[in-house]
Image (tube, grey):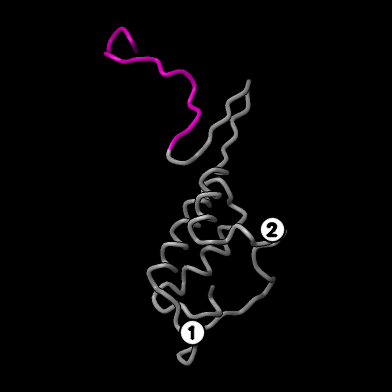
Amino acid sequence: MMKEFEMSDLRLLSYYLGIEVDQRGDCISLRQAAYVKKVLVQFEKMDCNPIQYPMEAKLKFGKDPEGKLVDVTKYRCVIGCLRYITHTRPDISYDVGIMSRYMEQPIVVHR
């Protein structure tokens, strides 16, 4: 392609849009460790404890008109960040999808 088009060889991809790319032999791995750390710092959650399962099994949420509302903008920002993290962490996709349902009127129980 370099004969036909003007281009430069940038070698193997190592970082792109917050995704760290590790290419070794016949294996490519993707991580977002730096991005996740940035999100945890941004939303002041660095002190949170890691858990094996992101959400309780069969946990039921609902729209509670009596519930105390939280900052809608901040909630949407958190959900947006989590949606981006699902590119490398498909194990949290279901849980983020459930929490996305409440972006219009999030209450304290949805945090």
Point out the stretch of residues depicted in magenta.
1-16
Q: Secondary structure beneath disc 1?
A: loop
Tell me the tag on residue 50. Answer: 2
Residue 70: image location, x then y, percent = 45, 78
Residue depicted at x 41% and y 79%: 105
Q: In the current view of this chain or complex, which residue is farthest to the right?
A: 52
Q: Is residue 24 left or right of residue 4?
A: right
Residue ID at (64%, 76%): 59
Residue 75 screen position, x and y as percent: 44, 69
**Which three-letter amino acid code belongs to the residue tagged 1?**
Lys
Q: Going by the image, does 43 lie left or right of 50?
A: left
Amino acid type assigned to the residue bearing label 2 in the image: Pro
Q: Is residue 52 above or below residue 106?
A: above
**Residue at the outermost top position:** 3
Nearer to the camera, 110 or 57: 110
Q: State which quarter of the image contains the N terminus.
A: top left
Write down the residue under mark 1. 63
Of marks 1 and 2, the one in the foreground: 2
Which residue: 51% across, 64% down? 97
Q: Is residue 31 above or below residue 47?
A: above
